[in-house]
Image (spheres, rainbow, N blue to C red):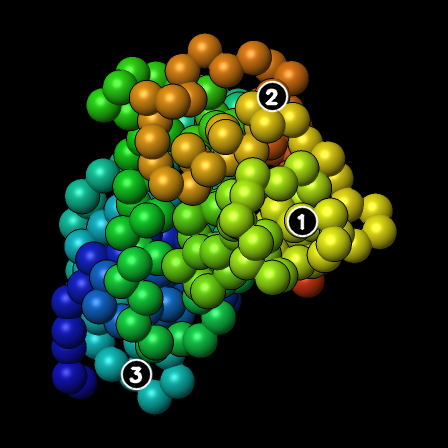
Amino acid sequence: MPTYRDEAVVLRTHKLGEADRIVTLLSRRNGKVRAVAKGVRRTSSKFGARLEPFSHVDLQFATGRTLDIVTQAESLEAFGDPLTADYPRYTAGQVMLETADRLVSEEREPSLQQYLLLVGALRVLNRGTADGPRPSSLILDSYLLRSLSVAGYAPTFSDCARCGLVGPHQAFSPAAGGVVCERCRPAGSARPTPATLTLLSALLEGRWEETRDVPDGIRRESSGLTAAFVAWHLERSLRSLAHVER
């Protein structure tokens, strides 16, 4: 069988037969890949523990008829080990994996930006930013906004999302794509505080120095708007988002 290598993050796994698993991965060069890991549920497996969700691995695959086969796995970073001891960070990480799985829908389509964004977000979740640690909710919201932007759903937090009128504006509509002016404002639009929109803009652009010492109320409001924006553009809520501590 032809073989190839790639780096990937394990998104999820499913049992197959008595000892195998189907592993869904987001890879650097091949996008989303579903592959069979034979015998990984046996205690004697050499790389079973390396193919759990959150694992960042260097893999060798053998090309199969329907699903490729994992023939070798070397651990690059075990993101899951530290996260399991911290419930807020673990649940935030679960949302990241589910988001990546949903946004990269086509298998074998190159998704380098989504791959790099996921790896970077998991690193920050484990180690903090260069500017110091941040609450897991802020890291998650930043990842959600940026991953949606990469997928083509970039929100605007300054100029009107519909007519382009230069802001700042006071209303926010997930359906419209961000902030809207009074003329374009749909019924039921939220009216977040200016500080919330400033925080959301900083999270989208990765300006971490501006996210230090944010009041809890502002963080909660920004998380609510982010969740609404994600639910609208993914057409349904992320299941794992319900377990995140905000």
Of tags 2 and 3, the one toward the viewer is: 2
Which of the two residues, 52 or 168, is positioned nearer the viewer here? 168
Q: Point out which mark residue 218 bears.
A: 2
Where residue 132 sits in the image (x, y, percent)?
Answer: 29, 16
> At x 59% / y 27%, what residue is drawn?
194
Measured Cα–Cα span from mark 2 to mark 1? 21 Å
- Residue 71 visible to an observer of this rendering: no
Is 134 placed above or below 192 here? Answer: above
Q: Point out which mark residue 122 bears.
A: none
Is 97 placed above or below 133 here? Answer: below
Where residue 242 sits in the image (x, y, percent)?
Answer: 68, 38
- Residue 183 visible to an observer of this rendering: yes
Q: Is 196 placed left or right of 30 in the picture?
A: right
| Residue 246, image quadrant | top right
Q: Is 7 placed left or right of 219 in the picture?
A: left
Q: Of label 1 and label 3, which has the lower sequence position?
A: 3
* Mark 1, other Cα within 10 Å: few <14 / some 14–19 / many ≥20: many
> At x 29% / y 34%, what residue is drawn?
123
Q: Indicate the secondary structure of the residue bearing disc 2.
A: helix
Q: Are marks 1 and 3 in contact (CB under 8 Å)?
A: no
Q: Indicate the secondary structure of the residue bearing disc 3.
A: loop
Q: Point out which mark residue 181 bears.
A: 1
Where residue 36 sits in the image (x, y, percent)?
Answer: 36, 68
Q: Indicate the secondary structure of the residue bearing disc 1.
A: loop
* Mark 2, other Cα within 10 Å: few <14 / some 14–19 / many ≥20: some
Measured Cα–Cα span from mark 2 to mark 3? 50 Å
Q: Which residue is the site of mark 3?
A: 64
> At x 43% / y 41%, what residue is drawn?
204
| Residue 3, image quadrant | bottom left
Which of the two residues, 171 or 145, is positioned nearer the viewer here? 171
